[in-house]
Amino acid sequence: MVKREVDIVVLSDIHLGTYGCHAKELLQYLKSIQPKTVILNGDIIDIWQFSKRYWPATHMMVIKHITGLIADNVPVYFIPGNHDEMLRKFKDFQLGSLKITNKLSLRIDGVNMWVFHGDVFDVVMQHSKWLAKLGAIGYDMLILINRMVNFFSIKMGKGKISLSKKVKDSVKSAVKFINNFETTVCDIAAENNYDLVICGHIHHPEIKNVQTKHGEVTYMNSGDWIENLTALEYNESGWRIYKYAEDLIAQSVDIDNKGKNKESAKQMMLTLMQELNVKGNTPEAA
């Protein structure tokens, strides 16, 4: 299969290790493209809800695909989010083409770009982390219920529905939170002379221009791989929101995971280290 070339791909809120993660679909997408740069903008592995009892083969296959890109010397920037925040202590750590950073500033085709996860602007995250974690568990349960509902809905010929989207769209405070989040991010970006800002965190894919008192800023959000299955792509000097639901080529990619579940966690880790040419040394926190 001829892979589609992409200059930059931005992924966030994958939440590997949770029931809601669409790892298979993400893997199909990744196998259909040839990115020149990858930005992982937070909540890639959901350490908050991580359980040794639930780690499907497709989740490890996503990790192995990303490490394969690093082994091929594709620049990969990893910006930890709140669900994988423990990795923030490794700020500025580099391994081959992989770099861990808490925020990223780039200048692309004359445009000053600022990339960060976005949880720093979440009031609940800053003041009631226990409530945020409780909400994450509830959200994961809602996704599980949604899958069961969709199973029967499809059987009845009614198609899929998104309970989480219906909840978000119907609760005024949720809509207000998204609007406030976007406005705050753009105000700070413009104040710091950025032309474009990219976030994740709120699971709401978006590209739009926002007028602030310091000038206009392009706001973008990569969405998630729980309900929207979206990413941001930069090609030929333009950005777009990638939607898996509209990509028939990615959907046709065959994922061979036969026998993967038989591989132990130790064997998987050894394979990853071999791909990265690591001898088993543990990196120190930066």
Image (cartoon, rainbow, N blue to C red):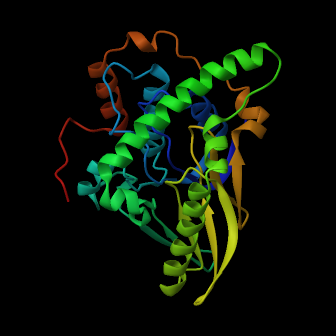
**Above or below for 266 versus 239:** above
In the picture, the quarter occupied by the C terminus is bottom left
**What is the quadrant of residue 236 in the picture?**
bottom right
> Which residue is depicted at the point 56% across and 49% down?
203
Q: Position of residue 268 (x, y in %)?
A: 34, 23
Q: Position of residue 261 (x, y in %)?
A: 42, 13
Front position in the image: 53 or 88:
53
Q: Residue furthest bottom?
A: 214
Q: Is residue 177 left or right of residue 128?
A: right
**Above or below for 249 versus 157:** below
> Which residue is depicted at the point 59% across and 63% down?
176
> Which residue is depicted at the point 32% across and 26% down?
51
**Above or below for 42 versus 280:** below
In the picture, the quarter occupied by the N terminus is top right
Front position in the image: 122 or 111:
122
Q: Position of residue 132 (x, y in %)?
A: 38, 48
Is residue 113 in view from this perspective? no
Q: Is residue 143 left or right of residue 169?
A: left
Q: Is residue 32 left or right of residue 118?
A: right
> Which residue is depicted at the point 31% across and 15% down?
264
Is residue 86 in view from this perspective? yes
Q: Residue furthest right?
A: 157
Front position in the image: 212 or 173:
173
Tally of numbered tags = 0
**What is the quadrant of residue 31 in the picture?**
top right
Front position in the image: 256 or 104:
104
Q: Position of residue 86 (x, y in %)?
A: 26, 49
